[in-house]
Amino acid sequence: MDQLATDRFGVWNAATKPDAVSPPSDAFAFNTLAALFRHSATRHAERPALWVEGAAVSYGELHDLATRIAHGLSDAGFAHGSARCAILGNRGLIDFAGILGAILSRCTYVPLNVRHPPQRLAQIMHEAEAQALVVDQHHLDQARGLLDAVSQPLLVLLPDTIAAPDWAVTMRRHRFLCCGDLSQAAVAGEQDCSEDGAYLLFTSGSTGAPKGVLVRNRNVMPYLRSVAARYVPTPDDRCTQLFDLTFDLSVHDMFLCWGAGATLFRIPDNVRFAPREFVRRHELTMWFSVPSTAAMMLGLRALRPGDFPSLRLSLFCGEALPKRLAAAWTAAAPNAVIENLYGPTEATIALTGFRVPRGIEAFDALPEVVPIGMPLPGQHALPVDSSSQPAADGEEGELCLAGSQVTDGYWRRADLTTQRFVCFDWDAADRIWYRTGDRVRHTREHGLVFLGRLDRQVKIAGHRVELQEIEAVLQHAAGSNAAVIAWPLGPDGLARGIVGFVSQTARSSDDMLDACRQALPPYAVPSAIHQVEDWPLNSSGKTDHARLRELMETPKCSKT
């Protein structure tokens, strides 16, 4: 790569460089998430680490609970840096402690969403080759269905349950440990290795099955060091926690906060889209959400000027941030620095960022979608053209990412890895570049500007959704031609949901939707299925999705 390309895509430019950068705190100097948390738990033992389920939990208390879980895993022989421990829950105390217990024992944690169907969770457990499962007492019913569906024997930890449920006796292939079985002794032989897996997440796959991304400590720690220097969190900060633990942005929530000795506030589900009183009552200082959350608040008239005076930092990531929405948030949080972050799971949480300007003239000069800016220090991002050459300034290209945050590829999927993780002959450093599938343009004024997708991937409330995966499920259920589109779109251009189409079927809409619910996460299940008699095809003989969108805008199809 020539020097110009290095200058343009490997460092911060004046438009995106933060106003102040400070050295990260001591905890961020460690090489693993486990060492980071142990340091803070020792240094801030009496301070609140977590506010969850209506109560504060100190660093010492959280560390003690996590250590009990880690000890259970270690006793079972899983503390060797290559085991995987699944966490089933809904952002409860045991879920956070389970994550910490897994990494303290050198296990990779695999978060599972209780709202996802058991069939999908069992598939993820199988693909992850998980050996253990942590679940709290509130989700034993979901655990029963999952444990019945998985084929491999598991160590099941129930840290807040006195005795295993009655149904456990029918599942003799699994071993159950309850709270009385978990020792309070320290985990023996604590070791930290940057090569250890930190977490394994599964995202929507275009082939009809979720695909895994293993993020190692050597990927996530450079990210945390960069954002710690950029945002300078302190023990006095009070940070929001809104993301499902299956969403990699939750890693930022937890470990940026805990590395600084700050307090993480798990915002309850019932106030996610109307958190004004919660934020004001607890005087939260750091906000992080997908733009859809703010858009929903705006639509519910729950985002008004001056609503969040305590916020000093507001971050958005996971989907495009409309300028109109950024303006509304600026008014609602007048004392906050606002940044738009960008990054796929394959590049560890976020790899680029753009600071929204406060001046009226600079803000007005922004494009309608807030730019995604420039890469974090030590990372690389640039668009390549159709010939896989670096695109010139102002020219559209596919965004490619490189650096220490880029992961090794897809879990147990060498075929997918070779498609997306590539080397370019013009890069003298012989780096591995991840091809994101996102279309961008580089500008001197704003850095990288997001333009859309090259494929049919969409974002629903920040969740990555491959429309081909939904189509595969729907086609199997209908036994006919099937297609889906993102619909409806809000006034901000953000997708609100999915609708499906079939050419002909003997099954009812309810039956097909039920088949989708059994195989897909809730946000990927179509809200409705329409039957189209004259199936639209393009000049290549493939389904014309643009025509299906026109049918929704001027409906001429009927529900089955």
Image (cartoon, rainbow, N blue to C red):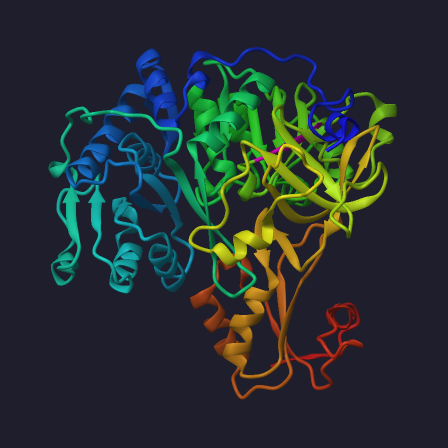
Magenta region, mostly helix, strand or loop?
strand
Side of 391 where 280 appears, left or right: left
Q: Position of residue 174 (x, y in %)?
A: 17, 55
Quick check: 528 above or below 400?
Answer: below
Residue drawn at 79 percent across, 70 percent down: 550
Q: Nearer the viewer, residue 493 or 229?
A: 229
Looking at the picture, does residue 334 appear above or below residue 272?
Answer: above
- The residue range painted magenta reads 350-354
Q: Is residue 285 visible to the viewer in this orientation of the structure?
A: no
Residue 555 in the image: state x and y as whole percent: 76, 74
Image point (51%, 40%), residue name? 407
Q: Quadrant of the C terminus?
A: bottom right
Residue that appears at 35% across and 28% down: 193
Q: What residue sits 39% from the left and 33% below the top?
A: 195
Residue 436 versus residue 389: which sits nearer the camera?
389
Q: In which image quadrant can residue 76 be found?
A: top left
